Image (tube, coloured by chain):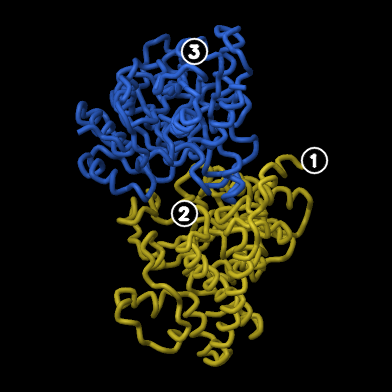
Amino acid sequence: MLPVMSRDQCLEAFRKMLLIRRFEEACIDAAAKQQVHGHYHVYIGQEATGVGVMSVLDKGDFVHSTHRNHGHLLARGADPDRALAEIFGRATGYSGGKAGTLHGCAPDLNFPLSSGIVAGILPISTGTAYALKYRKLPNVSVVFFGDGAMEEGAAYEALNLAALWKLPVIFVCENNTAEVERKPGGAQYHAPNMSIVELTDIARIMGMNTGIVDGLDMGAVWTAARDARERAIRGEGATFLEVRTHTWPGGQYPTLVTGRTDIRHTWNGEVPAEFSKHEKWFRRNDPVLSIARELLTLGMAKQAEIEKLDAEVTRAINEAVKFANESPFPPVEEALTHVWPH
Amino acid sequence: MTETMFGKAKVKAVGDLMRADENVVIIGGAGFGGLLHSKYVKPLFDEFDSRILRTPIAELGFCGMAVGAAIAGLYPIVTIGTGSFAFEAWPQIVNEAPNIFYMSDGKVKVPVMFQALGGIRISGAAQHSARPQAMLMQAAGLQIIAPSRASDVGPLLKAARESERPTFWIDHALLFEEQETGTPVKPPPLGKAAIVRPGKDVTIVGYSIDLIRCVKAAVELAQQGIDAEVIDLRTLSPLDADTICESVGKTGRLVVADECYPAASVASEVASIFTGKGFGLLKKPVQRLNFAAVPVPLSPPLEMHLIPRVDKIVAAAKGLMG
């Protein structure tokens, strides 16, 4: 279900999801041309989570992310030009080329540096939440992380501290392996590598509010995040949400299977023969296509409007690629700057 | 046939340890190389499938488990993955494992080997490029080995295993495909450095990937009429001051290449030999080539600017000859 928002707001949320999708596809293209430096992680299949959560946030809220941060940055409103330039290691990037793909950063959007260590960001988000509470600000900290983060000790310590001191944190655990059989030790895929079957149980026994949310359902994400934020502001402490999505079939590096999303799959049920083994993805598990279908069904958008929106977003991303490519690498003297604040 | 590719030789070396003793096990989530090299590692993992504990992303937990397993009769080889991930397990590696033998008055042994791909791996950025070795040198009781040549990795691993000391194997992401050429040097005993190229004009000291750069620099220097002696440290803890002093006693000149940051580094430790045991042997100041004291930047030109490249080693050695 779409969130309880106006048509314009729903279309804007959908536009952001498409923007993320096209951005990530552009990253994959660029990586094939050796323009992306270092290993990278895309957000394809999880767009409804970042956009849904970000839709309920205030400018003063903090947003924290991990190695899979591109989507969070864009959902928060980051400039795709500068975000892509950073991934390309260019001087015009958000961090002047010093950080790159694993460390998305947009401080002007209250989006401090992302951590490349899977659970490394959870204690930090707990700390920004503590500062918000201490300063009596009506804001929350949101932290996005993968199910893999729950394998690391830092996650447990952060959850305990947030629960113990009723800190205004929304922990958003993005489990992008919903199709994996839920049993101790998981299945053949490396995550979840957990003895605990339901990740929310961990937070629940700490006395935290918890929720399991379908990551294909932006309305459910939106509602859960809105409620969590309201509770946090009321002083009722942290919430742990597990948002479940399905593994993007193209995401298993280095085999990229599906290539570019054809937005016409929204209304055209034909799945190309070469992708027939991924039929479920096209029919059910792609959140961008799911939301587009909802917009059509609810009469919020027509086919032509969706195609037009996609064309606009694609054009913006093509511009971002051009901007990033035409941007210079930083001069070597920059390597020695910003070690200390003064 | 003797294996000349470093990565293949190290996989064979690990396999040899496992074949020799069924109590040798692998604990960890990572292989001994990156994804690009998994084809070379796969046969080892297939052969010893039941002796490999594939772990969650829980470095602190599984490194500590390896310490316990070592106490209880196993010899765990712990694959931590990227060198930076050693920091996730720091309490067990530096504050548990190295203390136990000493604090038990020599009664409780901890024969364990931690292995990590440390170093500047190209565009790893600041959180995936750590060289933890200099910090680890502050953990008394922890042995640190850093093989760099195909012919040396087997003997060094075997010696470390036989030493029964808790050992950290500083491996390097860029070493895997390095080919050893020429006649291999006979491996000296554990704790001794190796002279991999004799020379009389200048001593160049390195280890791991920096040793490869030193050897390449020596070849270039030879073309310019400078005869460099290249020393492979092999072990960082203990550090073999004698071999370095003998060499510098002959050349009077010293260049050290070390990817660590300058302060309290492997290079600074080597240089410090000449304030004591080696005092008076130098004709010129020591040239230390470290990575500048900044977090490792992602952008390729910035990163390349800071690495102890071959041309920098050549220039440093030539600068000493004037």
Q: Chain letter for yellow?
A: A
Q: Residue at x 31, y 56 (%)?
A: A187
**Dot 1 amino acid type:** His
Q: Is residue A110 left or right of residue A287?
A: right
Q: How many marks?
A: 3
**Quarter where residue A178 is shown:** bottom left
Residue count near mark 3 (Cα–Cα under 10 Å), binned few <14, some 14–19, many ≥20: many
Label at residue B165: none
Label 2's element?
helix
Q: Nearer the viewer, residue A303 or A213?
A: A303
Q: Is residue A226 visible?
A: no
Residue position for label 3: B241
Q: Chain of mark 1?
A: A
Q: Chain of mark 3?
A: B
Residue at mark 1 to residue at mark 2: CA–CA distance: 46 Å
Residue position for label 1: A342
On the image, the x and y values in percent for residue A331 come to 68, 50
